[in-house]
Image (cartoon, grey):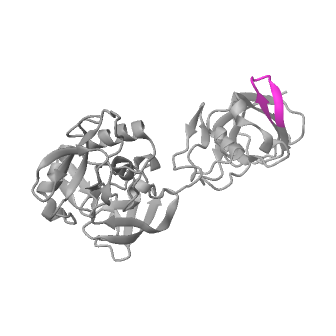
C-alpha cells in the first residue's frame, strides 16, 4: 500500500481577534498532504478524524470529530475544528493537550495516516471564555501560554474611578491647596475634573496634583474619565465646601475659629492635676485634660467636642499659641478687647490654677480653675 504523510504548515489560529466579545468555539487547522514520493495529493477528497488528547500523546480523548475536506491544487487542506458537542467544555487550563489527526486519502474512514502534536499556547486563550473575562474589571485573569495574567483595569465594583468623598476632603479652607488625585484608584488614560457651581477654577483640569481655592462657597464636582473601557463620568453635588477661616503662622499654620466659643466657662478639674503643662502644644494638652476629666462642661472639652465648618479636630490653644492669637488679634477678629477679657489657655499651672491671657493688654497670668473666662478654639492640619 502506498503511504502518504502530512506536513503541518499552520497549526492553529483564531477566527476572531476580539478582546471582550465572546470567542467563537472553533479553531482553524491547515496541512499539506504528500505521498511517500513527496508528491502533493491535490484536488482530492480525504477523510479525516481529529482528536484532542489530554495529558500525553496517548492520553484520554476529550474531543473527537470527523470531516471530509478536499485538498486544493497545492495539496493544502483547511478545516475548522470545533463547534460540536464537547468542544466548549474543554478546560484548557488543565493541559497539556495533544492534537491527533488520522487521514484516509480515499475520502473514507480507513485511516492510514496518523500524526500527533502537542497543542501550544494559542488555543489556551480560549480559556478566557471559561472564566468570563471582562476587561473593565481588575482582578479577572486570562490564561496565556503557561501562566495567568491579571487583566488591567480598575476596581471590580466600579470600573471607573470616582473622587474621594471623605469628610476631610469635602471641607476646604480658602487659600489652601488640596490634592484630589487618589493613586489607589489606578491610573486611567485621562482624568478631567469639572468644578461647577460658580467655582473660580478652570474646568477640564487634567490629572490635577493640587488645587488652590480662592473663593468661599459650596461647589459641585464632576469627574470624567477616559480609559481603555471608554468614557464615563460622575457628579457629586455640593462636594466642595470652601470655608474662610482666619489663619496665622504660629510655629506652623494655625486655623482659628472666627468667633469666641464661650463668653464664660471654667477651666475644669479643680483640685485635680491633669498633667497638661505644655506651653506650645495645645492639641496634646486638650487630649490630656479630656482623658483625665472625661465628659463635662469645661473649656478643653468644649473645644474637643466642637464640630464647626466641617471640622471636628478643634482644641484649646496652649499659652504660647494663645499669645500668638493675641498678637494677631486684629487680623483674626472677633475678640473682646476691653474690660475683663481673659481667655483660657490649655496650659495647667497646678492642681487649682491654670494659665490665662488678658486680651485688653496682653498680660499672661494664672487663675483658679473654677473661674469663668472666654475661650477661642483652634485647629491645625
Position of 340 compared to 15: left or right?
A: left
Position of 350 compared to 27: left or right?
A: left
Q: Position of residue 253 (x, y in %)?
A: 21, 51
Quarter of the image for the N terminus: give it: top right
- Of 238 and 85, which appears nearest the observer? 238
What residue occupies the far right of the structure in this picture? 109
Segment tinted magenta in the rendering? 51-63
- Of 23 and 325, which appears nearest the observer? 325
* Residue ID at (55%, 46%): 138
Quadrant of the rendered structure where residue 224 is?
bottom left
Quadrant of the rendered structure where residue 238 is?
bottom left
* Residue ID at (38%, 60%): 308
Q: Position of residue 226 (x, y in %)?
A: 45, 61
Position of 37 compared to 324: left or right?
A: right
Q: Position of residue 183 (x, y in %)?
A: 40, 47
- Main SS, magenta residues: strand
Do we see residue 239 in this rendering?
yes
Quadrant of the rendered structure where residue 53 is?
top right
Residue 27's place in the image compared with 54, above or below, is below
Do we see residue 11 in this rendering?
no
Q: Position of residue 85 (x, y in %)?
A: 85, 45
- Of 8 and 43, which appears nearest the observer? 8
* Residue ID at (46%, 50%): 185
**Residue 54 magenta:** yes
Residue 309's place in the image compared with 324, above or below, is below
**Residue 338 magenta:** no
Image label count? 0
Amino acid at each position: 500500500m502506498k503511504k502518504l504523510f502530512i506536513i503541518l504548515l499552520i497549526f492553529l489560529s483564531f477566527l476572531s481577534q476580539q478582546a471582550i466579545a465572546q470567542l467563537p468555539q472553533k479553531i482553524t487547522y491547515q496541512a499539506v498532504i504528500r505521498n511517500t514520493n513527496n508528491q502533493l495529493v491535490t484536488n482530492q477528497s480525504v477523510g479525516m478524524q481529529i482528536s484532542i488528547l489530554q495529558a500525553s500523546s496517548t492520553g484520554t480523548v476529550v474531543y473527537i470529530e470527523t470531516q471530509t475536506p478536499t485538498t486544493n491544487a497545492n495539496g493544502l487542506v483547511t478545516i475548522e475544528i470545533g463547534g460540536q458537542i464537547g468542544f466548549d467544555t474543554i478546560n484548557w487550563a488543565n493541559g497539556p493537550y495533544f492534537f491527533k489527526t488520522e487521514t484516509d486519502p480515499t475520502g473514507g474512514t480507513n485511516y492510514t495516516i496518523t500524526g500527533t502534536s502537542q497543542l501550544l499556547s494559542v488555543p489556551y486563550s480560549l480559556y478566557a471564555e471559561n472564566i468570563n473575562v471582562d476587561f473593565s474589571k481588575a482582578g479577572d485573569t486570562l490564561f496565556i501560554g503557561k501562566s495567568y495574567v491579571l487583566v488591567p483595569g480598575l476596581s471590580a465594583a466600579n470600573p471607573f474611578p470616582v473622587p474621594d468623598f471623605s469628610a476631610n476632603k469635602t471641607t476646604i479652607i480658602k487659600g489652601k491647596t488640596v490634592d484630589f488625585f487618589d493613586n489607589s484608584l489606578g491610573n486611567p488614560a485621562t482624568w478631567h475634573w469639572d468644578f461647577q457651581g460658580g467655582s473660580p477654577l478652570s474646568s477640564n483640569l487634567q490629572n490635577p496634583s493640587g488645587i488652590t481655592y480662592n473663593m468661599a462657597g459650596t461647589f459641585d464636582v464632576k469627574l470624567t474619565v477616559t480609559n481603555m473601557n471608554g468614557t464615563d463620568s460622575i457628579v457629586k453635588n455640593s462636594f466642595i465646601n470652601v470655608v474662610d477661616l482666619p489663619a496665622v503662622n504660629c510655629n506652623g499654620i494655625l486655623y482659628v475659629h472666627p468667633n469666641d466659643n464661650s463668653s464664660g466657662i471654667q477651666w475644669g478639674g479643680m483640685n485635680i492635676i491633669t498633667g497638661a503643662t505644655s506651653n506650645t502644644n495645645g492639641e496634646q494638652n486638650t487630649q490630656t485634660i479630656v482623658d483625665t476629666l472625661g465628659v463635662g462642661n469645661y473649656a478643653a472639652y468644649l473645644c474637643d467636642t466642637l464640630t464647626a465648618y466641617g471640622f471636628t479636630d478643634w482644641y484649646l490653644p496652649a499659652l504660647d499659641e494663645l499669645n500668638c492669637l493675641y498678637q494677631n488679634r486684629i487680623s483674626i477678629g472677633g475678640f473682646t478687647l476691653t474690660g475683663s477679657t481673659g481667655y483660657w489657655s490649655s496650659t495647667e499651672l497646678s492642681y487649682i490654677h491654670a494659665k490665662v491671657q488678658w486680651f485688653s493688654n496682653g498680660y499672661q497670668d494664672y487663675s483658679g480653675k473654677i473661674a469663668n473666662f472666654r475661650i477661642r478654639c483652634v485647629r491645625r492640619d
